[in-house]
Image (spheres, helix red, strand yellow):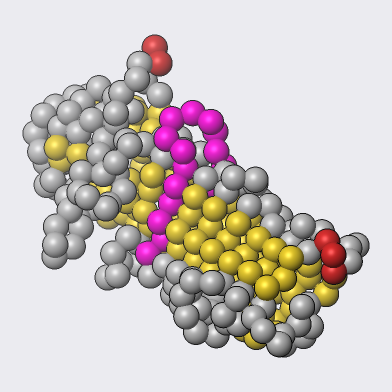
Amino acid sequence: MANNALIGTDTTWTTTGNWSTGAAPVNGDVVFLTNNQTLITGGLNNATVKLTTLNMVMDFTGRLGSNAASGNTYLQIAATTGNIGIPPAGGAVVNGSSLFNWNAGTSSTVINVLTSSNSGSAQGQSPIKLLGSALTVNLMGGNISIAALPTENATVSSLNVIASGQGVSPQAYLGPGCNLGTLTLTGGYVVSNSQQLVTSAIISGNNVRFVHQGTGGFNSLTIDNGGVTYNGSGSVNSLSLTGSIDLSGGGGTVVFGSVTLYAGAVFYDPLGRATFNTTPTLVNCTRANVSLNLGLGRYQ
């Protein structure tokens, strides 16, 4: 295992002179992208290489991969761990990379995102875009997309969004092909356009926001605090509600298996999109402790 830092300016990842060890990264390396402005657009297919760690420090202001109308290109390289948005030595304030496209492949990878550039190099695209089929993502700050384009696919066993209070507030976009197992949202903002069923989502935090606008539903959706805007479709097998859910946007029927309401719950469905397999249940509260707008002539 060797520490290997990007020191050159060639636009091809595999150019040996780009690297502090005198060789492009190999299995087991700990790679550092730091204090460099290089735009890396070539030699991106390194799918047979597995790093110990891929580190991106915020003083790396170069670019990794490219965006194009025909599709984005990614650095293809596996890693056990990825650390993105590390503060530079001395705590200098820098913008970071506006284009960091990484495909971690099929290996199990834990990606920790601390912060990011304020915006991406292309309008409407996140500065950090991720792909992989065995990802765990811990988002503490920064703007990321996972499987951003309709043609892309990714599998995330766990997405944990926890605001650190430093850098860019955490925000994530999940594309149609993002298959998400568990979402834990305690700070920040997540928009999901996923067409896949989410196993479990827990929304907890006074200022968090989750927007569901895909066709995939939820096996279990818990809204302790904060709000969920449910513009998409897909059934919710089990809903536990203390915060708020808003179904006033979008269209189509949303089927709820079981609904448990606690004091402070807000269920807003003025167009009557929701159908219930069982009557919602009040727990440790009375009807006066919850707010229900389910459309005319429905359970109130």
Q: Is residue 28 above or below residue 9?
A: below
At a point 72% along the width and 85% down the height, the residue shown is 298
Task: Give the magenta-colored segment's residue range.
Answer: 157-175
Residue that sits furthest to the left in the current view: 10
Q: Residue furthest front?
A: 296
Q: Is residue 254 visible?
A: no
Residue 100 vs residue 174: left or right? Answer: left
Residue at image coords 67%, 78%: 294
Report the front residue among 236 and 14.
Answer: 236
Percent from the top left, x then y, of residue 33?
28, 31
Residue 147, visible in the rendered structure: yes
- Quarter of image, res 286: bottom right
Q: Position of residue 175 (x, y in %)?
A: 37, 64
Q: Is residue 299 magenta?
A: no
**Residue most extreme to the top:** 90
* Count of picture labels: 0
The answer to whether 191 appears left or right of 95 in the picture is right
Q: Quadrant of the C terminus?
A: bottom right
Residue 108 screen position, x and y as percent: 46, 54
- Give the residue drawn at x 45%, y 69%: 213
- In this image, 261 relative to 194: left or right? right
Question: Would you place residue 259 above or below residue 88 in this image?
Answer: below
Residue 290 lies, in percent from the top left, at 78, 64
**Image quarter hosting the N terminus:** top left
| Residue 282, quarter of picture | bottom right
Residue 217 drawn above or below residue 263: below
Whether residue 165 is in magenta: the answer is: yes
